[in-house]
Image: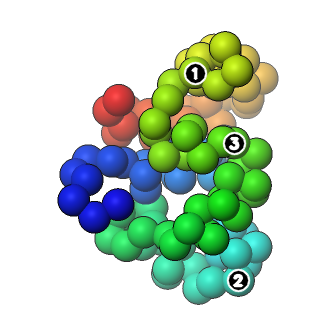
């Protein structure tokens, strides 16, 4: 990922984590890493290795393309459509949290 500016992996990690309602500590525990290491991923201060990226796709049940922001369509369904379906089922509090995350993202 060196040389790629504004890849926003960290922002996508944060959105996927919050979509599941999980803490940074929970993801770090699953990955068997320190919470601070995972926090650095979300801040784009450091990047996960390939094995960790694969684990993250499994944890969030998403494709590597979706995690890395390579494509916006997965099996003919746009991420926006998928997110919209999830969004309407969330509590108002969760919706506000997700909207706050999305406001910080640019595609």
Question: Closer to the camera: disc 2 or disc 3?
Answer: 3
Q: Residue shown at 43%/56% (left/top)?
A: 10
Residue at mark 1 = 73
Camera-nearest residue between 106 and 3: 3
Q: How many numbered callouts?
A: 3
Q: Are marks 1 and 3 in contact (CB under 8 Å)?
A: no
Residue 106 lies left or right of residue 16; in this view the side is left
Residue 100 lies left or right of residue 104; in this view the side is right
Q: Residue 8, image x and y in percent?
A: 36, 48
- Disc 2 secondary structure class: loop
Q: Residue shown at 57%/79% (left/top)?
A: 35
Q: Can you say whether 19 is above or below 41 in the image?
A: above
Residue at mark 2 = 32
Which label belongs to residue 62? 3
Q: Can you say whether 98 is above or below 38 in the image?
A: above
The quarter of the picture where the N terminus appears is bottom left
Q: Residue 22, image x and y in percent?
A: 70, 57
| Residue 88 in view in this figure | no
- Disc 3 secondary structure class: loop
Camera-nearest residue between 64 and 15: 64
Q: Can you say whether 3 is above or below 80 in the image?
A: below
Which label belongs to residue 60? none
Q: Earlier in the sequence, mark 2 or mark 1?
A: 2
Q: Quadrant of residue 53?
A: bottom right
How far apart marks 1 and 3 lie (CA) works out to 12 Å
Q: Residue shown at 76%/73% (left/top)?
A: 30
Q: Residue shown at 21%/59% (left/top)?
A: 3
Q: Earlier in the sequence, mark 2 or mark 3?
A: 2
How far apart marks 2 and 3 lie (CA) works out to 20 Å
């Amino acid at each position: 990922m060196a040389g790629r500016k504004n890849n926003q992996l960290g922002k996508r990690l944060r959105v996927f984590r919050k979509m599941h309602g999980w803490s940074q500590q929970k993801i770090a525990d699953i990955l068997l890493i320190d919470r601070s290491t995972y926090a650095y991923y979300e801040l784009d201060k450091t990047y996960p290795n390939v094995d960790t990226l694969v684990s993250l796709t499994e944890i969030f049940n998403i494709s590597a393309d979706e995690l890395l922001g390579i494509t916006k369509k997965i099996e003919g369904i746009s991420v926006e459509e998928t997110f919209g379906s999830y969004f309407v089922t969330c509590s108002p509090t969760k919706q506000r949290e997700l909207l706050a995350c999305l406001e910080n993202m640019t595609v």
